[in-house]
């Protein structure tokens, strides 16, 4: 595990050392470049490369070993900035004092380093096409050429040469052009294009007889080819996200609640009422008011939310619809009941003041039910309600459970809730919220074994209902992940650490294949399962699970702040298995810090991760040297040396979901 030590300074300013780092001995200049780019926060958007001092030409062979030039200093230029790299020699750190030393193996190290290489390629490659490249693809798709065309992902140019990294677009005179022309003629009431060779030329000749038709065709072709280019890019993993099945694609007006079809323009910006921009002011043609949309991304999918709100548009739209139903009701008693349902929707959206106002409006006609709703959503006093209304019985029992730790009493209350749910047709989200509440209350119970058995039953019944339906909404996925994480953490800490494996296997199997396949949910389960396996004496599979969590972050559906927290926690967990892979720590710290600066994670979440870093370094061994490396590469000051090393119990305490307390 020998390492090459080097300094990075601005050329001509040798007194100012910017970074000090180490990479595995025997690394190449290409390996060194990856370290430099990552530590400086750069990418390859400008001319960059190595130069031997005294030479004006870039180094051609980056695969040369670092000592190919006699260990003399080299220059690295990035645009107009030039760095001086000084090789300081080889060190041979001893990581044998780590409690995880017996868990290490060449195969595990190889798996971790392959994962890091995939991560580097993911960051280095363009996951999204810019407008210029997308326009080139659209032009190639809509052209009548007869030869293959390729997009070179390194230069973002369309060529006829199939180079390394190039992706086939489509052959000219393709089915796309014929289909587009046929659709255009159908929409404009024109004669469909002729059959046979040379049809496109004859089609254009017919259109040229009318300047109006010719202009309309150009506009139609431009829009159709752009949409086809976006689909092509998405199919090839270059742009776009997975469609979210949890809502219809309609964005509601936050004032009147009327919904309009949402789409994306060529730059990936949302479009509502023909006004693209992101973040954007959207105009409601019905009520004439404007509101601002932002992006909502929690690792399960990209959705839209209104500025200042923490839930996606389709959730806040349900609140608008519930209020409209209540306002339009003329019967006073029914109106009060609908106001209480709207209050629960406001609670779901995190709008406590609005929920309280709605309950106040309903309290005169339905005082006891209002008291039950008020207590459930968290600002009213617990109350005993002996009435016959099923909703009030459900909520009253849930409030009563919050102060109970006796398993027998909790079990009786849950049986009562389950019986009342069968009598009342509740919104699906509320049923899931009640199930999560039951799991969280069981976490404080004094009978761990029976409590976990009941948790397994709750989660199992939820899985059965999803399998029977054959789909799962984003909201259900989030809540199921919260239930699974809470149950796993409870079982791991209060029973045998291996106890939750059966539950994790069951949930992973349900979401890794089949009709409810969902990669983000599978990633949540893999992280927890990997942590559980770390605690076992025979931990085969732990590294594979944790590596899969990081790989999931590189996919289109896996990107997002919550997925990021899981991936970076997996990096901390993997570091003791291969402390030579210091990238695991530096990527986690730099990425989480960048996410905190952009507002994607809170300061508390950043502190939570940074508190775990020193423990991970101690678990790897050679704490002092490793700490110097992390602080040099990240420019972040770590806290004092911890007394204990990182354990699976520490990782179990980290939060990875929005809704898990």
Image (cartoon, rainbow, N blue to C red):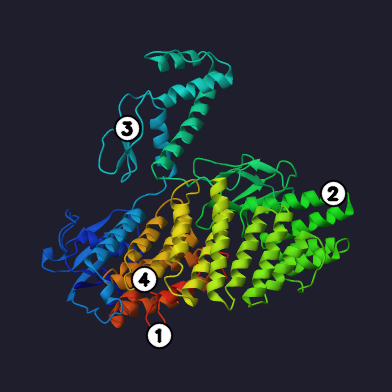
Residue 165: give x, y in percent of width and height.
Answer: 29, 44
| Quadrant of the image containing the C terminus | bottom right
For marks 1 and 2 on the same chain, the one whose residue lies earlier in the sequence:
2
Q: Are marks 3 and 2 in contact (CB under 8 Å)?
A: no
**2 vs 4, front mark:** 4
**Closer mark to the observer between disc 4 and disc 1:** 4
Q: Nearer the viewer, residue 482 or 281?
A: 482
Q: Quadrant of residue 590?
A: bottom left
Q: Quadrant of residue 101?
A: bottom left
Answer with mark 4 or mark 1, whichever residue precedes in sequence: 4
Q: Residues within 10 Å of mark 4 (few under 14, many from 20)?
A: many
Q: Which of marks 4 and 2 precedes in the sequence?
A: 2
**Please, is residue 458 above or below residue 494 in the view?**
above
Report which residue position mark 3 lands on.
149
Q: Which residue is the site of mark 2?
A: 329
- Between residues 337 and 192, which one lies in front from this camera angle? 337
Distance from disc 3 to disc 2, alpha carbons, whole Å, reads: 61 Å
Mark 3: secondary structure: loop
Q: Secondary structure at mark 2?
A: loop
Tell us which disc is closer to us: 3 or 2: 2
User: What residue do we see at 42% from left, 65% from top?
Assistant: 529
Label pair 2/4, CB-CB below 8 angstroms: no
| Label 1 residue SS | loop
Crowding at mark 3 (Cα within 10 Å: few <14, some 14-19, many 20+): many
Question: Can you tell which mark lies on residue 534?
Answer: 4
Give the mark nearer the N terminus: 3 vs 4: 3
Numbered disc in front, either 3 or 4: 4
């Amino acid at each position: 595990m020998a390492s090459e030590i080097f300094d990075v300074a601005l050329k001509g300013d040798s007194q100012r050392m910017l970074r000090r780092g180490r990479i595995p001995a025997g690394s190449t200049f290409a390996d060194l470049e990856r370290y430099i780019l990552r530590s400086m926060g750069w990418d390859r958007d400008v001319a960059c490369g190595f130069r031997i001092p005294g030479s004006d030409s870039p180094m051609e062979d980056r695969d040369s070993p670092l000592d190919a030039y006699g260990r003399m200093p080299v220059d690295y230029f990035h645009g107009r900035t030039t760095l001086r790299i000084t090789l300081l020699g080889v060190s041979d750190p001893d990581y044998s004092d780590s409690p995880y030393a017996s868990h290490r193996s060449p195969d595990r190290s190889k798996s971790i380093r392959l994962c890091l290489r995939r991560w580097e390629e993911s960051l280095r490659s363009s996951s999204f096409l810019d407008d210029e490249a997308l326009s080139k693809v659209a032009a190639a798709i809509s052209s009548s050429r007869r030869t293959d065309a390729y997009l070179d992902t390194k230069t973002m140019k369309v060529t006829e040469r199939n180079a390394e990294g190039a992706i086939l677009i489509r052959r000219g005179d393709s089915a796309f052009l014929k289909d587009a022309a046929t659709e255009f003629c159908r929409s404009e009431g024109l004669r469909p294009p002729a059959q046979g060779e040379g049809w496109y030329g004859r089609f254009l000749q017919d259109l040229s007889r009318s300047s109006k038709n010719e202009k309309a065709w150009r506009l139609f072709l431009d829009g159709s080819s752009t949409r086809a280019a976006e689909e092509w890019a998405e199919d090839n993993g270059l742009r776009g996200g997975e469609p979210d099945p949890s809502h219809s694609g309609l964005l509601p007006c936050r004032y009147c609640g009327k919904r309009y079809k949402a789409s994306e323009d060529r730059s990936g910006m949302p479009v509502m009422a023909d006004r693209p921009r992101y973040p954007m002011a959207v105009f409601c043609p019905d009520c004439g008011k404007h509101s601002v949309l932002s992006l909502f991304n929690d690792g399960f999918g990209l959705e839209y939310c209104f500025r200042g709100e923490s839930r996606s548009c389709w959730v806040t739209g349900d609140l608008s619809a519930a209020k409209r139903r209540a306002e339009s009701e003329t019967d006073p008693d029914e109106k009060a009941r609908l106001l209480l349902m709207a209050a629960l929707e406001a609670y779901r959206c995190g709008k406590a003041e609005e929920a309280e106002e709605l309950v106040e409006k309903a309290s005169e006609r339905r005082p006891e039910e209002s008291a039950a709703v008020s207590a459930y959503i968290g600002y009213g006093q617990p109350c005993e309600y002996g009435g016959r209304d099923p909703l009030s019985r459900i909520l009253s029992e849930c409030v009563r459970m919050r102060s109970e730790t006796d398993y027998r009493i909790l079990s009786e209350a849950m049986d009562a809730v389950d019986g009342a749910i069968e009598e009342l047709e509740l919104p699906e989200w509320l049923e899931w919220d009640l199930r999560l509440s039951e799991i969280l209350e069981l976490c404080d119970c004094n009978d761990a074994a029976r409590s976990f058995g009941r948790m397994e039953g709750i989660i199992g019944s939820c899985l059965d209902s999803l399998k029977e339906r054959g789909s799962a909404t984003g909201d259900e996925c989030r809540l199921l992940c919260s239930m699974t994480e809470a149950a796993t953490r409870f079982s791991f800490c209060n029973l045998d650490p291996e106890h939750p494996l059966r539950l994790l296997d069951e949930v992973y199997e349900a979401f890794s294949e089949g009709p409810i396949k969902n990669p983000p949910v599978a990633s949540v389960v893999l992280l927890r399962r990997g942590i559980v396996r770390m605690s076992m004496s025979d931990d085969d599979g732990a590294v594979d699970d944790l590596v899969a969590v990081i790989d999931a972050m590189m996919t289109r559906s896996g990107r997002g702040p919550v997925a990021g927290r899981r991936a970076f926690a997996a990096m901390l967990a993997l570091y003791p298995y291969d402390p030579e892979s210091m990238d695991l720590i530096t990527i986690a710290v730099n990425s989480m810090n960048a996410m905190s600066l952009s507002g994607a994670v809170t300061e508390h979440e950043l502190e939570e991760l940074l508190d775990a870093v020193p423990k991970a370094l101690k678990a790897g061994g050679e704490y002092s040297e490793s700490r110097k490396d992390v602080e040099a590469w990240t420019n972040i000051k770590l806290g004092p040396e911890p007394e204990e090393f990182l354990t699976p119990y520490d990782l179990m305490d980290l939060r990875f979901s929005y809704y898990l307390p």
